[in-house]
Image: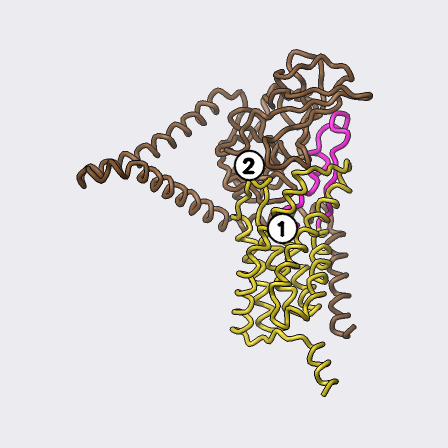
Amino acid sequence: MKPLNFIALVLFICGVTWVVTLSERSVRRIQQTYYATITPFLKGGSSIESQARNFLEEIEHSKDLENQLRAIEEEYIKLRSIEGRLRELETENAELRRALDFKEKSRLNVIAARVIKRQPATWWETAIIDKGQRDSIGAGVPVIAPGGLAGKVDIASEDTCSMILLTDERCQVSVQVAGTPEVGILHGTRGRYGEEPRLILRHLSREAAILPGMKVITTGKGGLFPSNLLIGTVKEYTPGPVEGVALVQPSVNFDELGVVFIIAQKNEPEG
Amino acid sequence: MGWYHLSLLFLVITACIFQQFTPTFQSLCDAGILLVPLVFLCSAVTVGAGPMLLLAFTAGFLWDAQHVITPLPAALLGNPEVYDNPGGDVKFGYSIVLYALMGFFMQGLQPLFREGKWHVSALLAGIAVFLYLSAEYLCVTFVRGDLILTHSLFLKISFTALLTMLLCPMVFWVLYRLAGLFHHTISYEGLARERNTAH
C-alpha cells in the first residue's frame, strides 16, 4: 500500500470513529443545520414543481378540448384559458376552505402547515413541512391531517420540520380499538412496498373480539399524542400464542398529504 | 488533490440537493433513483483510494444527515410504561463505512474502466447499488430486529439498482467532461508500470 493511501485510510478511520461516537444531541444539531441549509433549495424546488404540475395540467386540459377549440374563435380560447385558471383557483380555494373548516372544528390548538417534500429515503417514511422553530414547533410534536393522525415532528429547523410519518416503523402510538377494551402499540410496517400502507397493532389480547372495520383511535396514554385521534380501521386480526396482532388501514391518505396540522398545545390532560 | 477532485466533491453535494427531487415509482414497488450513491460510485472508479475515501466520507455523512432518524431526547420518548420499547435505529455514520466498501468494490475493476470499458463499471455500479441497499436494509433489520424478507422488498431493491444504473452513462459523461475541463487524466498506474516493465 502506498504511504499516501495508508495515511488517507488512517484519516478515514479517525473520521468515521469521530462521526460514530458523536452524541445524539450533536447529531441532531448536525441534522438541524443540514435541513436549514437545504431549506431554500427545497422551497424553491417545491415551488417549481407545483408550477410545472399546474402547467402540465393546463396542457392536459387543453388537449382534451383541442378538437372543439379548433372551431372556436380566438376570444373564446382566451375565455377558456381564463376559466381553466379560475377552476384551478376554485380547487385551491376549496382545499383551503376544507383545511380552515378542519382547523375550526378541531378541539386542539393547531398550526396549519404544508408538506413541501416527501423524503426520497429508501427505508424511512418522512416528510418535510414548511413550519419550524420560528412557529414554536419542536421535536416530538404530533402532526395531524384531514383524516386523523399523520405522524410526529422529528427534527425542527428554523423554517422547516422533518416529520416521521405514521407509516414508519419508528413512529409508535398507543392506541385503542374503539368499542373494546383492547389497547396496544401501533407502528408502520417494514418490507411492504408498492401497495397501500398498512400499520401493525401489537400487544392485543390473544383472543380479542376484534373484527375488520373497527375503528382505531389514540388512547392519549404515554404523553406523546392526544386521545381520540382517529388512526384508521382494522383490516385483519390474527390471534397468536402470546398476543394478538392486527393490521390497520390508516385513515389518512399518505399519497396525497398536502396540508397538515401541528398540535401546538395539548388541550387535554394526558393519561 | 486537484481541481478535479474538488469538482467531484461539489458534484456529490449537488447530487444531494437533486436527490430531494427524484421521484419514487409506486408501480415499481416504490423504487427510486439514488443519485448520491450513483455519483459517488461513478466518481470512485475515476480516482485513487485517498480521494475515494474523502468522497465516501462526504457522501456518507450527507446521506446520514438526511436519512437517519436520531432517537429523540428521553423526555420526548413518552412514558416508558406505555412505550417500553422505543426501538433504535442505525447509528449516524454507518453509511460512510458502506460507501467506502462500495468504493473499494468499484475500484476493483478500475483497470477495465481506465481502458475505456466504462460499461463494465456501469454494470458494476448497478450491482454495487443492489449490494449497498441490501447491506443498508440488513443494518436496519439488525438494529430493529425481525428479519422481514419479502418479494416486494427484493423487487424494490432490484428496480432501484436498475433505475440508478440506467443513469450511469450520463454521470460518466459528466465525469469525462470534468476530467477534460480540469486536465485530469483518468489513467491506471498499474498498466503503465506493466508496459514499462515489458519494454
Amino acid, disc 2: Ser
Point out the image quarter for the N terminus of chain B.
Answer: bottom right
Which one is nearer the viewer's eye here, A167 or A100?
A167
Q: Residue B80 in magenta?
A: yes
Kindly indicate which chain is depicted in brown in the rendered structure: A
Q: In this view, does A67 lie to the left or right of B136?
A: left
Amino acid bearing label 1: Ala
Task: Calculate the distance from the C-alpha at mark 2 to the C-alpha at mark 1.
Answer: 41 Å
Q: In this view, does A154 lie to the left or right of B135?
A: left
Which residue matches tag 2?
Answer: A136
> Is the stretch drawn in magenta largely helix, strand or loop?
loop
- Residue A39: x and y, percent? 52, 48
Q: In the depicted view, which residue is nearer to us: B185 or A171? A: B185
Residue assigned mark 1: B161
**Drawing shade for chain B:** yellow
- Write down the chain letter for disc 1: B
